[in-house]
Every structure is written in structure tokens, then in C-alpha cells.
């Protein structure tokens, strides 16, 4: 059986040929005030999108003095939704992109480079600024032994006042002898600071292991990673230090649907997002050509995260190739937040073409991309399609000013 990737139809193409998700209605905002008192306008408005999703967007209102006639009554102010659209791609030839917004106000970026020989960091006050930010090499592969080949999928985390980078690597002698490793930086600035090697994360079973990520929940830190034990599957375990696990790993996801078994049987690249009483783990599936796609695991935040029964898997992929926007093989994502903190953002990679010569891993053009992550009425994330744009369709926000 051949899995046919979803084809995004082109009936909603905006100007320039980029498919858009249209806003169908902007809900009115009601503001009450007294004559002579300027109205206190909210910084956002609720908009209904064509797929039934309701989202908040920042608003730039027209001058408030237009609604101050000095006598009781109802007046209307209009405003323009501010919809951030990021350059696509954001950064070329940077796969497995990871963006962290730190408490210092900076965004930090790291990713796999096509040579798979080093770990890089960028920093900017804005996501857009990452595209042109200086790139610093903070670590290079070894010439012999461990950490000597296939330097893959670095992630930057700040834990208990220190910086950590989780990454996968093979040995110089065997590039497929992939295992997870950790670097540590005790300095305040991870760009200029000194990085030391904490070594390999020891796992009970020695086999191909990669894509380690970490998160904290209710005072417990967890590690989630992909490992080939039969198939490439996802495991979770508690951590006792930022570079070691304790207890037996628990299998929480393995390939079971056709869309997870194209070219290779793969679940990998876990990324954690917590919201609304649930913990979501997005992951990537299948081989790294145009059939690469993303799935989703969900657990209640009150459940035992080490119980496989706590996790449910979406039977359908949540992000797939879009021929309409020419983005192929989207996946290996991370999550971050917008500059004003009002929205969640999806960070992922995709190629601009379908056909690949040779092994997909060695095609360099998996580009880092960013787009808004939406939320369905049932509280689950809506990933949309790669290259998604939100179109206000000429609609304006309205504030009904009631004076009296």
C-alpha cells in the first residue's frame, strides 16, 4: 500500500500564490466609559476563522478621540488586526530547528547543519531577526571516537540556572552508531560562554537513539527520545540530573499507521507543549523525503506520564506535505511563543521541492520555518498546513464605545 500525501487545494490562494486561511468575522468589542473620559481599548480582538477556530489577535485602533463627542451615546472605533507573518523560509539549510525564548528577552536558535559536524547558536530580540543574526559555532565534532559524526538535532534548554544542549551523534568510526549526548554551560551567556561535555545519556538498551528532549511537570523532569528497538519509537523516563535518567524507560508511541511507515517505520523528533490541562507531544513520522509528516500524542496533565495508557495518538497526521505552498516533508518541530506572548508558534523544517536525488538525509535544503499554531474549540492544537497564512479578508475590528 502506498500512502498518498495530502494535497492542499488552491481555492484559497492569496495574492502571490500563498494559500491563506481566511478570517470570516471579527467579534465586536464593547467598551463602557463616561463622557469626557477616553475609552480603555483592549489590545486584542477575537476573530473567527473559516475552519471554526476562534483566535485573539493584537489590534491597532484608530485614534480614540474620534469616540469622544462629549455626550452620552454609542460610537464605533475601527482597528486593524496585527497578524504577524514570518519570512518563509526563515533560515535556509537549517534542519530540525529549535527556538527558545528565554527570560532575558532573547530568542535563541539552533539546528542541524548540512555538514552534520558542529553545533551553532543564534540570538535575536525578534524571530525575524534570527534570519540575519550572527551564527556562532559553540562546539565541533570529535576527530576520533564518540561524538565524531552525524551531529544531529541540537536543542537548547535552561535548567536550574545552567544551559544545556541535547543532541545526537555517531562515532567517528561509525556514523550510524547514534546516541544522545549533553553539553553544559554554566555562564549566563550561552553564545560567549564555555561549554563542557557531560557525555552520553546512558540508556538501558544500547541501540540507535536520538532526538532527546526534556520537560518539567509538577516538580518532575522527564526525558523523551526516539530509539530503535524493533522500530524507531518514542520513550519517556524520569531524570535525576539534566544528563541522566532514572528508572525504566516507558514506550509511549511506535509506528502503527501507514503514514508512519513510508520509506522507514519511524516515530522521532518529539516536541512538548503544555496547555489547558493537557500535555501534547508532536512527533515526526516516516522517512525524511516528501512523506515525512507529523503526528500528535496527548495526555492529561493529571495522569501518570510513565503509564503508556495515559497517552493517546491521533490516527491522522497533523502536518503533511503541501503542494499548494511547495513545502515538502514538514517535520522535526519545536514550539515557541510570539514576541508579545499572545500566541504559540510552530517551528519546523520543510524542503521547497519533492524530488530528491540519493539519500534524503544528505539533501541540504531542509529550511527552518515558523508559523502560527492555532487552537481548536476543543482545546487541541491546529497545525494547519506548512506555509499557512492568515488572511483578514479586508475585515476590521470594531469597538463599540458606550458613553453614559
Image (cartoon, helix red, strand yellow):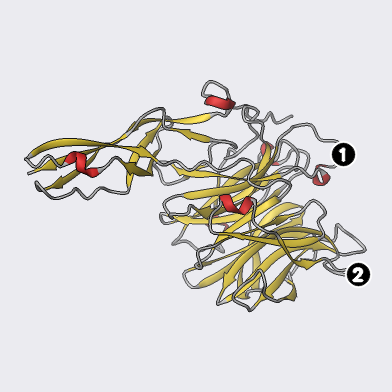
Nearest the eye: 271 or 315: 271
Local crowd size for mark 2, using a 10 Å CA cut-off: few (<14), some (14–19), many (≥20): few
Mark 2 secondary-structure assignment: loop
Q: CA distance from mark 2 to mark 1?
A: 27 Å
Taking the spot 19% from the left edge, 45% from the top edge, the residue there is: 31
- Direction from residue 212 to residue 86 in the image, left or right: left
Q: Position of residue 349 (x, y in %)?
A: 67, 45
Judged from the image, the secondary structure of the residue bearing numbered disc 1 is loop
Q: Residue at left 87%, top 58%?
A: 175
Closer to the camera, 375 or 257? 375
Relative to residue 188, is residue 400 depicted above or below?
above
The quarter in which the C terminus is drawn is top left
User: Crowding at label 1, few (<14), some or many (≥20) Cα neighbours within 10 Å?
Assistant: few
Q: Residue furthest right?
A: 173
Identify the mark at residue 199; answer none if there is no mark.
Answer: none
Q: Which residue in the rendered view is the most extreme toward the top? A: 11
Residue 244 x, y percent position in the rendering: 67, 74
Quadrant location, the N terminus: top right
Whether residue 301 sits left or right of residue 13 in the image: it is left
**Measured along the vertical axis of the image, is residue 144 above or below residue 336?**
below
Q: Earlier in the sequence, mark 2 or mark 1?
A: 2
In the rendered view, would you say 251 is above or below 196?
A: above
Give the residue displayed 72% in from the left and 44% down from the top. 366
Residue of label 1: 358
Would you name the residue on which mark 2 appears? 144
Amino acid at each position: 500500500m502506498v500512502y498518498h500525501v495530502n494535497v492542499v487545494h488552491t481555492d484559497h490562494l492569496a495574492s502571490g500564490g500563498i494559500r491563506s486561511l481566511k478570517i470570516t468575522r471579527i467579534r465586536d468589542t464593547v467598551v463602557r466609559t463616561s463622557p469626557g473620559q477616553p475609552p480603555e481599548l483592549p489590545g486584542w480582538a477575537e476573530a473567527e476563522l473559516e475552519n471554526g477556530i476562534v483566535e485573539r489577535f493584537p489590534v491597532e485602533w484608530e485614534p480614540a478621540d474620534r469616540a469622544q463627542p462629549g455626550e452620552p451615546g454609542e460610537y464605533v472605533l475601527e482597528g486593524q488586526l496585527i497578524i504577524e507573518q514570518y519570512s518563509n523560509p526563515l533560515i535556509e539549510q537549517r534542519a530540525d530547528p529549535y527556538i527558545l525564548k528565554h527570560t532575558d528577552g532573547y530568542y535563541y536558535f539552533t539546528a542541524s547543519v548540512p555538514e552534520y559536524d558542529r553545533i551553532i547558536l543564534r540570538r535575536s530580540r525578534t524571530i525575524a531577526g534570527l534570519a540575519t543574526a550572527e551564527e556562532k559555532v559553540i562546539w565541533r565534532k570529535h576527530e576520533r571516537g564518540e561524538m565524531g559524526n552525524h551531529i544531529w538535532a541540537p536543542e537548547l534548554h535552561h535548567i536550574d540556572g545552567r544551559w544545556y544542549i541535547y543532541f545526537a551523534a555517531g562515532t567517528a568510526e561509525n556514523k550510524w552508531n547514534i546516541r544522545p549526548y549533553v553539553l553544559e554551560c554554566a555562564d549566563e551567556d550561552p553564545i560567549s560562554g564555555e561549554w563542557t561535555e557531560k557525555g552520553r545519556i546512558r540508556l538501558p538498551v544500547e541501540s540507535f537513539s536520538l532526538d532527546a528532549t526534556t520537560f518539567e511537570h509538577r516538580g518532575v523532569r522527564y526525558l523523551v527520545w526516539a530509539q530503535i528497538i524493533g522500530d524507531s519509537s518514542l520513550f519517556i523516563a524520569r531524570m535525576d540530573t539534566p544528563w541522566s535518567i532514572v528508572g525504566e524507560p516507558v514506550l509511549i508511541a511506535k509506528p502503527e499507521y501507514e503514514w508512519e511507515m513510508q520509506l522507514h517505520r519511524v516515530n522521532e523528533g518529539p516536541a512538548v507543549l503544555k496547555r489547558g490541562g493537557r500535555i501534547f507531544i508532536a512527533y515526526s513520522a516516516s522517512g525524511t523525503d516528501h512523506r515525512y509528516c507529523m503526528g500528535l500524542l496527548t495526555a492529561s496533565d493529571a495522569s501518570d506520564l510513565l503509564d503508556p495508557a495515559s497517552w493517546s495518538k491521533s490516527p491522522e497526521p497533523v502536518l503533511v506535505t503541501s503542494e499548494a505552498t511547495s513545502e515538502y516533508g514538514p517535520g522535526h518541530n519545536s514550539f515557541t511563543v510570539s514576541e508579545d506572548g499572545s500566541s504559540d508558534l510552530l517551528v519546523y523544517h520543510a524542503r521547497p521541492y519533492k524530488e530528491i536525488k540519493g539519500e534524503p538525509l544528505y539533501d541540504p535544503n531542509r529550511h527552518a520555518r515558523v508559523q502560527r499554531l492555532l487552537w481548536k474549540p476543543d482545546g487541541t492544537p491546529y497545525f494547519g498546513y506548512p506555509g499557512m497564512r492568515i488572511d483578514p479578508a479586508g475585515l476590521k475590528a470594531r469597538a463599540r464605545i458606550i458613553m453614559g
